[in-house]
Amino acid sequence: MSQGMIARRYAKALVNLAENEKDLDNTGIHLHSITEVYLENSELRQVLSDAKVSSGVKLEIIKDVLSKIKVSKLVDTFIRYILAKRRIDFLPDIERAFNLLLQERLGRIEAKVTTASELPKDTVKKLVNAISSYSGKEIEVNVTIDPSIIGGIITRIGSTVIDGSIQTYLNQIRKSIIRG
């Protein structure tokens, strides 16, 4: 079984538990907090994944970390569980899968928009409305600026990319000229 599939199973279980406790958003925030600490501290990752370190020592370390960042009881129990199952290395993948499942459950979708320059607020609002009507879901838009696209807009919704950049248009013209 691939690491992605395993991470998705754990994430799905956590989403179901959080949904039962009616604490989806909070669980996501706390899971992100512990994942951030895990990713930022290479010594922590090394100790928690080292087979030579006893599970008791690992448990004490994770208890200390969890108490310092004050995660919810559900996330605390979940992190201890994946540590006991020797799946702590999957934590970043579990968080990614959790966030995707959470957005799906809440009827939200993230759209990543790339533009050559900053967009006016009313244009962003129109874009959100257009993407929302296209997808049928509540949209959360993250706008990034990349001058290399020259102009236009590139929109990524999940795995769908709508590329309306001038750079892509120019590349297509160049290819057609080369083909003759």
Image (tube, helix red, strand yellow):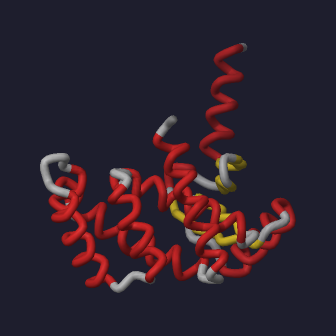
Eyeballing the image, is 95 above or below 126?
A: above
| Image quadrant assignment for residue 135 | bottom right
Across and down, in percent, residue 54 comes to 16, 56
Eyeballing the image, is 106 above or below 161?
A: below
Question: Which residue is more in the foreground, 136 or 116?
Answer: 136
141 sits left or right of 132 in the view: left
98 sits left or right of 109 in the view: left
Query: Which quarter of the image is occupied by the C terminus?
Result: top right
Across and down, in percent, residue 138 comes to 76, 72
Eyeballing the image, is 177 above or below 138?
A: above
**Would residue 160 be seen by someone viewing this image from the given angle?**
yes
18 sits left or right of 80 in the view: right
For the point 40% across and 63% down, the residue is 81
For the point 51% across and 58% down, the residue is 96
For the point 48% across and 57% down, the residue is 94
| Image quadrant assignment for residue 78 | bottom left
Question: Which residue is more in the foreground, 31 or 21?
Answer: 21
| Image quadrant assignment for residue 130 | bottom right
For the point 55% across and 43% down, the residue is 5
